[in-house]
Amino acid sequence: MKKLNIGIMAHVDAGKTTVTEGFLFHSGVKNSMGNVDNGTTTTDSMELEKQRGMTIRSATVSFMIGETKINLIDTPGHMDFIAEVERALSVLDGVVLVISAKEGVQPQTRAIFHKIQQMKIPVIFFINKIDRLGVNTEEVYEQIKLQLTDNLLLMQRVSYEYDGTGQRFCLFKRSYKEPDFAEQVIVMSEKLLEKYMNNDRITEEDYENVIRSRIHYGKLYPVYHGTALKDVGIIELMEAVSKWFMPQDHKNRPLSAYIYKVIFDEHNHKLFYVRIFSGQLSIRMRTTIEKDNSEIIIRNLFGLENGRLIPVDKVDAGDVAVIMDAKELICGDWIGVKTKQHVFTQTEPLLKVGVRPVPPVNRRELLEALQILSMEDPYLDLNVDEETEEIQLRLFGNLQKEILQMLLKDRFHLDTEFDSVTTVKKDKPLDKITCIVPIFEQGNLLQAGVGLTLEPLEEGSGFQYETKVSFGDLTKSFQNGVREGVEKGIRRGLHGEVVDTKVTFMHSDYNSVTSTPADFRRLAEKVVYQALKEIGTKTMEPVMKYTLTAPQGYEKKVITELVRLNAVMEETEYTQSEMIIKGKVTLEACKDFATQLFTITEGRGIFETTFWQYRDVETDNRKVL
């Protein structure tokens, strides 16, 4: 049986959840299509999702299209949930990218498509809402070509008619007998081109093999059309998913499985959603967690079938499994071995926010709730400041803050106050320093002695660790304790996480009777803090690469704003209708600029950013060094 893991992605309100409902209805999972406005959709199962009419976290449902099993993941459409988006993308065989024919390509559409391209995932475009008054599909095609890709293959023709009651449309499947359609495919393949030049017969299978291969390698993007809310074009899109997306080869490889989602069910059981890239998961099997090679026993295993979880004895490669109540696991873990072609670098949240319970007496309940949410999304990075006792979270944007506050209210019945979102700053030591705290030294109550050397590195080097203490002098478990303590100290820093720094473990004292790895772990963290305090640090801020796209005619307003932000403008180019500026700017300066640009360009400007590196930034003029 063929298995495919498919994502539906889109800008907010483009209709991706409605498309999902159409898939579930036509596959027989549901007797009728749910409605976002009525709060009756399957994948938007959280009450908050139903209230807001938007997807907040990924959901997975399973159904059949013919002989193909589809695991469909309905993902968030806003980049404030980028961690959820990236985890979902990492397990997919293909993506249906929904674009509203009325609104066209939106800023989030571009951000999502660029992320999909970066992760080399095949895409089918679905142009939704083609029944809306004033829609011009040719304009939508041009937007896609200009802003996303020009490697389009229109699989249908759309014909509009006007009568006394308004606008009507008809969809026609394109045929390889159409010369322009056939030739567009032929020129993609030397083999087909040779057949064409020799007047040899080209079969439908020949055409389809070329299309499928080009889609698989991200060289071609088929385009389908419809109106999901009226159930038009959904069956054709389902057939396209089964026809064009190719499952990965999983044969003769060891177990490799990735945990892309963690949720708590209504009985407070923790459910781990796992994509199996190769090998097999089975009940009661013993395997390992890749990050530390620790052992795990699979005690509760479920498969996905027709929208439900069912207990199973095994789940094969290419499929999605659910493991229940495995305390050793967290979201983002690999079970077995890590598959190299699926390793990706997740975007790091660069904003933080403080949160307080209202009334303050609910502090313990708030911490318990946030611990649960952090298990579901580790990038929240729940932290309590040891000095101020402030509860802090890491975020991607203001919408995520708003959703969290509502989630705490609706799911955990907690009222909270959130501070304004601020930029995550990091420390870097001013100079090289060696700090040694011997065992039995006055003030050292731990049964350990640790000496560390901290030295600053070139910007962008990150954190590096080395031990010069032999494992003959200090065994692995104790050395692991030192490293864990150093890493905790580096994450804490003086005012924030330490970057571009190398730490060398170069001295140890050890008592064979009383010393424990925990002593070395706690002392190593203290030595890092002491060293940073003695040598001093400088503040590093996140600097972003940006691409600003705006219609021609807005140059003066746009450039004035960039100057106000002290942004560096490195490259400017013009298309037929747009101005594109690329450069660098501090996140602190630009974190609200996308909204401002939207206003000054009357909704037509787009501001995309990606993290570049932490840099020492002048405080007087904010220029990037």
Image (cartoon, rainbow, N blue to C red):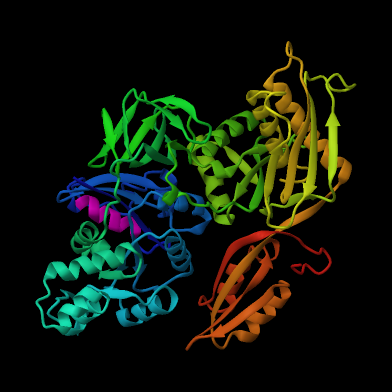
Residue 481 shows in the view: yes
* Left or right of residue 427: residue 44: left
Image quadrant assignment for residue 96: bottom left
Most foreground residue, 610 or 160: 610
Q: Residue furthest top?
A: 513
Residue under the point 85% across and 49% down: 431
Most foreground residue, 243 or 564: 243
**Residue 53 magenta:** no
Q: Residue furthest right?
A: 442
List x then y, in percent, for residue 297: 40, 24
Q: Which residues are magenta?
A: 16-25
- Determine the main secondary structure of the stretch shown in magenta: helix
Residue under the point 75% across and 53% down: 457
Specify the quadrant that holds the N terminus.
top left
Q: How many marks?
A: 0
Specify the quadrant that holds the C terminus.
bottom right
Most foreground residue, 96 or 159: 96
List x then y, in percent, for residue 536: 86, 47
* Left or right of residue 77: residue 409: right
Image quadrant assignment for residue 380: top right
List x then y, in percent, for residue 132: 30, 74
Residue 169 shows in the view: no
- Residue 87's place in the image compared with 237, above or below, is above
Residue under the point 25% across and 74% down: 189
**Residue 20 magenta:** yes
Image quadrant assignment for residue 160: bottom left
* Left or right of residue 557: residue 217: left
List x then y, in percent, for residue 223: 28, 71
